Image (spheres, grey):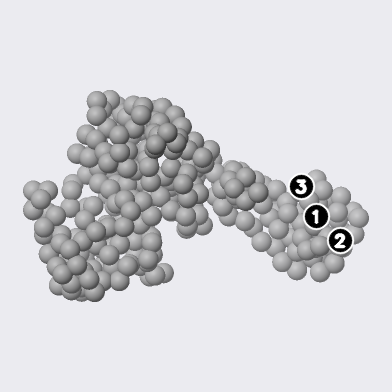
């Protein structure tokens, strides 16, 4: 079921097109990954949905109801966009108290601080927080407002590995409790592990909109490294699925998941024993394929 549907969204800055009639939707109760190169339009989409920027065109539907003003979405969504700003000489808890008062909420701040892993530092001044701790506080800030849709722009910035895993666990927990989550990130490998769907922006347009289930059906790019050039019969097999580079003694093949093991067996049987076999992350593979023109 679609929680949020966006149709024909366009945005221009100073005559420059940032979003080009993009249409997409977020499924209720799912985690969606929003990805793309710098400048692709990810943050612009969040800013439009947050009511911070007025688009040139576009229609937004929330739970089947058209919104006359996109900024009305703020009543049922929370956002984390760009670097969060807090009062540095107030503690983390005091900052949340202030935000809670402004929003007119009765949220249990102790529970919220525990949830994001900041309870030992609740009385510590924010000016002494690390970047990762400020990110956690920003997540807590978004949760003061009782909503069913959470939009997070690069929430993993500044987090150490433990903090990253803690945040993943938190997002999964919120999702299991019914929260629909949209995460913008450049961490493709990690994003593929926990998101249910992916939207790839490129040059202000939607270049890929795919569920994880359909993503896993795609062929994988698999690299085979050899210590010498394989025999002719092995090269013929390689040419059916991909290509071979003599300079690096590497074959790059496009294979179905079930074909990888059998291909290794066939290569070995033809006298070509790979010294290394590496499977490229599916999401990363599609990302590089679509954005390859940026590297030219």
Residue sitting at x 44%, y 29%: 21
Crowding near pointer 1: few (<14 within 10 Å), some, many (20+)? some
How many angstroms separate mark 2 from mark 1 (CA)?
9 Å
Crowding near pointer 3: few (<14 within 10 Å), some, many (20+)? some
- Position of 91 compared to 235: left or right? left
How many angstroms separate mark 3 from mark 2 (CA)?
15 Å
Is residue 218 something that shows in the picture? Answer: yes
**For the residue labelled by badge 3, is the local secondary structure a helix, a strand or a loop?**
helix
Crowding near pointer 2: few (<14 within 10 Å), some, many (20+)? many
Q: Position of residue 42 (x, y in %)?
A: 41, 45
Disc 1 marks which residue?
A: 244
Q: Are marks 2 and 1 in contact (CB under 8 Å)?
A: yes
Outermost residue toward the right in this view: 232
Vertical comparison of 202 with 57: above or below = below
**For the residue labelled by badge 2, is the local secondary structure a helix, a strand or a loop?**
loop
Q: Identify which residue, 81 or 64, lies in the foreground.
A: 81
Q: In the rendered image, which quarter is residue 129 located in?
A: bottom left
Q: Position of residue 122 (x, y in %)?
A: 17, 70
- Position of 233 compared to 143: left or right? right
Disc 2 marks which residue?
A: 230
**For the residue labelled by badge 1, is the local secondary structure a helix, a strand or a loop?**
strand
Q: Identify which residue, 169 or 135, lies in the foreground.
A: 135
- Position of 224 compared to 211: left or right? right
How many marks overall? Answer: 3
- Position of 156 compared to 71: left or right? right
Residue sitting at x 12%, y 48%: 103
Disc 3 marks which residue?
A: 241
- Picture quarter with the N terminus: top left
Vertical comparison of 29 with 186: above or below = above
Q: Identify which residue, 4 or 234, lies in the foreground.
A: 4
Residue sitting at x 39%, y 36%: 14
């Amino acid at each position: 079921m679609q929680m949020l549907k966006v149709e024909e969204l366009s945005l221009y800055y100073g005559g420059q097109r940032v979003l080009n009639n993009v249409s997409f939707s977020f499924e209720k109760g799912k985690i969606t990954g929003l990805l793309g190169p710098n400048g692709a339009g990810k943050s612009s989409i969040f800013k439009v949905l947050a009511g911070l920027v007025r688009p040139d065109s576009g229609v937004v539907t929330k739970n089947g109801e058209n919104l006359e003003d996109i900024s009305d979405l703020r009543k049922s969504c929370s956002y984390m966009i760009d670097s969060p700003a807090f009062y540095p000489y107030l503690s983390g808890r005091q900052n949340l108290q202030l935000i809670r008062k402004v929003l007119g909420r009765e949220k249990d701040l102790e529970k919220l601080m525990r949830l994001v892993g900041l309870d030992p530092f609740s009385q510590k001044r924010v000016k002494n927080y690390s970047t990762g701790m400020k990110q956690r506080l920003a997540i807590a800030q978004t949760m003061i407002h009782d909503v069913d849709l959470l939009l997070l722009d690069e929430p993993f910035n500044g987090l150490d590995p433990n903090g990253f895993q803690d945040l993943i666990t938190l997002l999964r927990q919120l999702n299991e409790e019914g929260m629909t989550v949209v995460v913008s990130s450049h961490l493709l490998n990690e994003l593929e592990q926990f998101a249910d769907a992916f939207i790839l922006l490129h040059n202000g347009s939607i270049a890929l909109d795919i569920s994880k289930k359909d993503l896993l059906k795609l062929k994988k790019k698999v690299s085979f490294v050899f210590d010498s050039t394989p025999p002719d019969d092995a090269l013929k097999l390689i040419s059916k699925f991909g290509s071979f580079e003599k300079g690096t003694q590497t074959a790059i093949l496009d294979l179905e998941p079930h074909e990888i093991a059998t291909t290794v067996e066939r290569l070995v049987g033809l006298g070509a024993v790979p010294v290394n076999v590496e499977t490229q992350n599916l999401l990363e593979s599609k990302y590089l394929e679509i954005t390859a023109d940026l590297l030219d």
